[in-house]
Every structure is written in C-alpha cells, then in structure tokens.
Amino acid sequence: MSDTKTGPDPERPVPAERREAAREDAERRAKLYWKNGECMLLGVVLDFSDEGARIRFGDICAVPDAVYVEIEGSDRVRPAVIRWRSLTEIGVAFE
C-alpha cells in the first residue's frame, strides 16, 4: 500500500495525511514569542488541532525552532516546536 494518493496532477502525487489528530480550519490571530518574550511576530492560524497548528506570516526568516504560541480565543500561551516552514507559513507541534 502506498503513502501517497493522486492529486489533480497525476505526475505529482499528494502525500498521505500523517497527523493523528484532525485539524480544524480557522482564521484566528496568532502571536509567536521567543527570547523570553522579547521578540514577537503576528500571524494568522490557518488550521489547528490539540497537537499543532499551521500559521501564516508576512515573513518568518528570523523565527527560531522553539517558540511560544498564543492563539486568539485561547486562554494560554503554549510552547511549540516548528516542524516545517516555507517563506510565509510554519507548522508547529505543541509540547
């Protein structure tokens, strides 16, 4: 059995979902903190679960791998590790 499925372009298969928890679509504001709160970056949560989130920013070049995430509507700031990044988005796993 393959770990991929066919997407719109059969030459570029879509990887199978690897997350154990289902993600909820969201358009909530997010704040990333690092350096004991000295540095902060505003973004938008695109989707999230109890285990992690995908967050979009204007520019994320200076964000370290270990951060704290605060999501609008939540009553806590959660430690997280960046699992992947692109030019404008990151995927974090909550610790």
Image: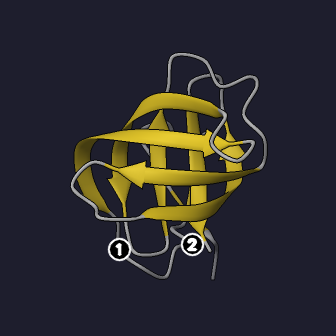
Quadrant in the rendering for residue 92: bottom right
Residue 14 visible within the image:
no
The disc at residue 55 is: none
- Relative to 87, does residue 54 appear above or below in the rendering? below
Between disc 1 and disc 2, the foreground one is 1
Identify residue for label 2: 18
**Does residue 28 appear left or right of residue 9 in this picture?**
left
Q: In the rendered structure, are the residues bearing label 1 and label 2 in contact, judged by CB atoms less than 8 Å apart?
A: no
Quadrant in the rendering for residue 60: top right
Q: Nearer the viewer, residue 16 or 84?
A: 84
Q: Quadrant of the C terminus?
A: bottom right
**Does residue 23 appear left or right of residue 92 in this picture?**
left
Q: Residue at x 35, y 74 (%)?
A: 22
Identify residue for label 1: 22
Q: Nearer the viewer, residue 37 or 90?
A: 37
- Relative to 7, does residue 87 appear above or below in the rendering? above
Q: Residue at x 59, y 54 (%)?
A: 68
Provide residue 34's location: percent of width, then percent of height: 69, 43
Classify mark 2: residues with Cα within 10 Å, few (<14), some (14-19) or many (20+).
few
**Secondary structure beneath label 1:** loop
**Does residue 84 appear left or right of residue 23 in this picture?**
right
- Relative to 48, does residue 33 appear above or below in the rendering? above
Provide residue 31's location: percent of width, then percent of height: 45, 40
